Amino acid sequence: MEHVETLSVLQEIANLAHEGLLLYNLKENRVSYANRAASELTGLMENASPKEVFSLLSKLTQPEREHLKSYWTEILENSTAHVQIRFPGSREQELYVSCRGYFLAEAGVVAVIIRDITEAYQHKEYLLKYTMKKNNLLDTLVHHISGALNLMQHLSAEAEKHIGGHSDHNLRTYLSLVQENSRHCLRIIEALNKEEYREAPHIAPRKNRLDIVKQVGNIADELKQSYISRPISFRAAARSIIVSTDEVKLLLIVNNLTSNAIKYSHESDPIIITIDEQETDVVIGVTDQGIGIPNPLKDSIFQRQQGHGRIGLQGEQSFGLGLYISKTLTDLLGGRIWFESEEGKGSSFYLSIPKE
């Protein structure tokens, strides 16, 4: 009797709430209750049969169904679990829902609170895409402006060597101003880069489910638009690979690796970005045919370089932070990062992260 009263209270609350509530009776093997919000989100009504539930789940992709299966097991074992599910469709019709389940063992009922998070998810995707655009724009500016400023410093220093006599006093002054302003601009770029990455390793990861092929593919597309004359290619083992990770940290690592590939290779050298799927992990690779890594540097490549990183081929500043932060973020994500490189022939960096 107490269980019946408890479920009645839950139903009364659900009727007043905007979130969906489904009650699934394990003994009767049916949906024993669905409020209006739950029915609108799922299409399931009260007394829905297992066949109707299966029909709904058949709309999911295979990885989503497997994920939902593990979620159901977790509820029964731990009495509670949380999952985010994507129902596929066109860009405008995709539905993202958050489900938090509770197993009421004595009543033999699983209660699932359902919330539509489509708008929040799409907003987050927009912010991620905006962040990637900003990162690529910053890298492009650093790549071109640093090179130009370093060349300006070099040329003004060379010109100063050929100045002689008192009549060239004003010209010497002007050249000194050019050099000083170039150094000032380079210091600004250095400060921007350091600030960009300074806090990232100290923020705890926040996992969300994402399509890693889609997100890394966006980075590849942005690079192709930013570096039109450079051959950049992207290959993935599948059209869609779902992982559960901190997408901001993951994409920052990938951005660092692609930025280095551009910095340490010539404009005509190809850059290849790959995604390979293994049983429990996904491996992202970034390969270039640039200058490679000298043997003396290989053992310390992921250590903080205290502002003494290698200068890029176009004179870009390097602050010794990118790979150090990439390694730190990889550890936070429970992954692994490594490389293969031969001096004068290029480098391949690999990032492996768990799917869950």
Image (cartoon, rainbow, N blue to C red):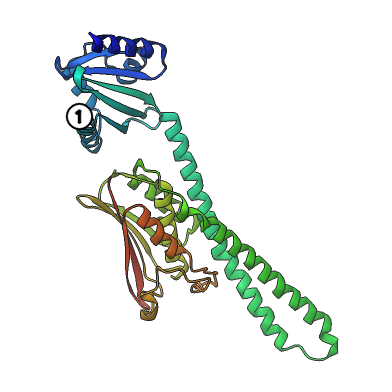
Q: Look at label 1 and name its amino acid.
A: Leu
Which residue is found at the position 29% from the left and 23% from the top?
Answer: 112
Answer with the quarter of the image where residue 341 lies: bottom left
Percent coordinates x, y for residue 316 in the rendering: 54, 69
Of residues 16 and 143, the one drawn nearer to the viewer in this rendering = 16
Residue 255 lies, with reference to residue 32, above or below; the image says below
Percent coordinates x, y for residue 355 in the rendering: 27, 47
Residue 298 lies, with reference to residue 69, above or below; the image says below
Answer with the quarter of the image where residue 51 lies: top left
Percent coordinates x, y for residue 144 in the rendering: 57, 65
Horizontal relation, residue 169 to residue 58: left or right: right
Answer with the quarter of the image where residue 97 lies: top left
Residue 307 visible in image: yes
Q: Could you tell me which secondary element the residue under label 1 belongs to?
A: helix
Of residues 223 and 87, the one drawn nearer to the viewer in this rendering = 87
Tell which residue pokes out farthest to the right in this image.
167
Of residues 23 and 272, the one drawn nearer to the viewer in this rendering = 23
Which residue is found at the position 22% from the left and 34% from the top?
Answer: 74
Tell which residue pokes out farthest to the front in this image.
2
Percent coordinates x, y for residue 32 in the rendering: 23, 12
Which residue is found at the position 33% from the left and 23% from the top?
Answer: 113
Residue 74 lies, with reference to residue 37, above or below; the image says below
Tell which residue pokes out farthest to the bottom in this image.
165
Residue 225 visible in image: no
Horizontal relation, residue 141 to residue 41: left or right: right
Residue 3 lies, with reference to residue 315, above or below; the image says above
Which residue is labeled 1 in the image? 76
Quadrant where the image shows the C terminus: top left
For the image shown, how many numbered marks are present on the structure? 1
Quadrant where the image shows the N terminus: top left
